[in-house]
Amino acid sequence: MQVYDNKSTRSPNSCSYCRQPGHNVTKCPHVSGDYASWQRMEVPLKDPDCWVLTTNTRYGRAHWFKHPRYWGEWYDMAMNAHAKQEAEKQKAQSPRKRTGPRKCGFCGETGHTRRHCAEMLAFRQKAKRANQAIRRYIYDLLVTEHGLDVGALIEPVRKQYVYSAGEYKLISHGICTITSINWDKISVTSDINGSLDWELETPIIVDWITPDGARGKSKININREIVGPPDERYSNHSYGGHSFIKQVISPSPTPLDEEWVENAREDAFDWLSNKRNLEWLRNKNLIELVDRWSARYEEPEQNDESR
């Protein structure tokens, strides 16, 4: 799910006063010195160690506060930043007022927090079973039935409008080799059925390489045909240059990794239940999806060797 997988790519916090990363305006070390200078009716640039003199902006240019035309803006920003820091100090010194009984950030009920929330624990357990169920299903669908895994030979095609013919035709990429499938990200959010928001969807992506070294990828929707020409029930414009797997020429029957099934993105769903609440998950249709796939969960059979 993109909301989890892309969390580390977000830009770090930066200060609204000095624009430097790693802190916000209430913690900015430059505000107090600049404010004191302006209170003395002096431009902070009189200090040879002023941060404006040592900081370069984008493309290595000198900071714009060095120019007199921007000193009025600098003064206003220093006053506002100082006011925010003073307000933050007052807030820290004031006793915290309890506005009401303690409320759980996940389920919204009073009397407990997320740490002791039975609803959140139940969601995590159900999500784990649901993810294990869909991983077994997708393995059976992709690998057991079609032989799709790293090393398999496939023929991807794309539907393209050919102007000389005046119609759409299937263009083959030739005999290609699968180089990777994003197995580690597969979960119930890989069930692309139109009910989830884009930030939760985790499409199954098959990466492949052509005989001449060009790389491409195909997106798999488990609710449609996995192998074969594009389904004619969908309009030509809905393909958007997407490549489909027309046929599997040489399958790659990789054995099922039980550890892969067991792990089942537990870290992602633990993070999601910590960052979002039950109402948000329900409104995003994730609760319904988890319920549906957890109902398909079956306890793995125990054999003599695994006991």
Image (cartoon, grey):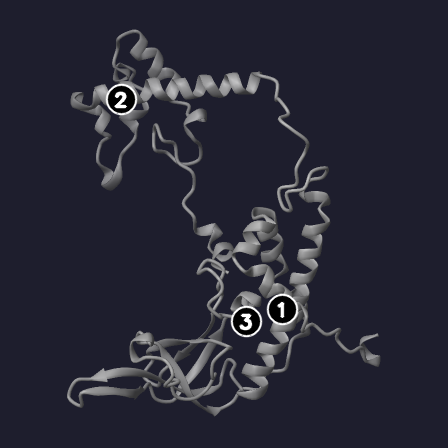
Looking at the image, can residue 187 be seen? no
* Residue 270, percent from left and from top: 63, 53
Give, as a three-letter code, the residue at label 1.
Arg
| Front of the two marks 2 and 1 | 1
Q: CA distance from mark 3 to mark 2?
A: 52 Å
Q: Residue at x 64, y 67 (%)?
A: 130
Apparent side of residue 190 relative to residue 128 in the rendered image (left or right)? left
SS assignment at label 1? helix
What residue did someone put label 2 on?
Answer: 74
Q: Give the x, y percent position of residue 7.
A: 48, 51
Left/right of residue 147 with respect to residue 24 in the rendered view = right
Question: Residue 84: which disc?
Answer: none
Task: Please state if 15 lies on the left or on the right of 106 as rendered.
Answer: left
Label 1 vs label 3, nearer the camera: 1
Query: For mark 1, does the 10 Å Cα neighbourhood hold few (<14), some (14 to 19), or many (20 or more) residues?
Result: few
Q: Which residue is mark 1?
A: 292
Report the Cα–Cα distance between label 2 and label 1.
57 Å
Mark pair 1, 3: CA separation: 21 Å
Mark 1 or mark 3, earlier in chain: 3
Q: Residue furthest top?
A: 40
Location of mark 3 (residue):
183
Q: As shown in the figure, which amino acid type bears the numbered disc 3?
A: Trp
**Residue 204: where, in percent of width, then height?**
48, 72
Reply above or below: 28 against 226.
above
Identity of the residue drawn at 67% across and 57% down: 124
Mark 3 and mark 2 lie on one chain; the one further toward the N terminus is 2
- Observer-nearest of 46 and 98: 98
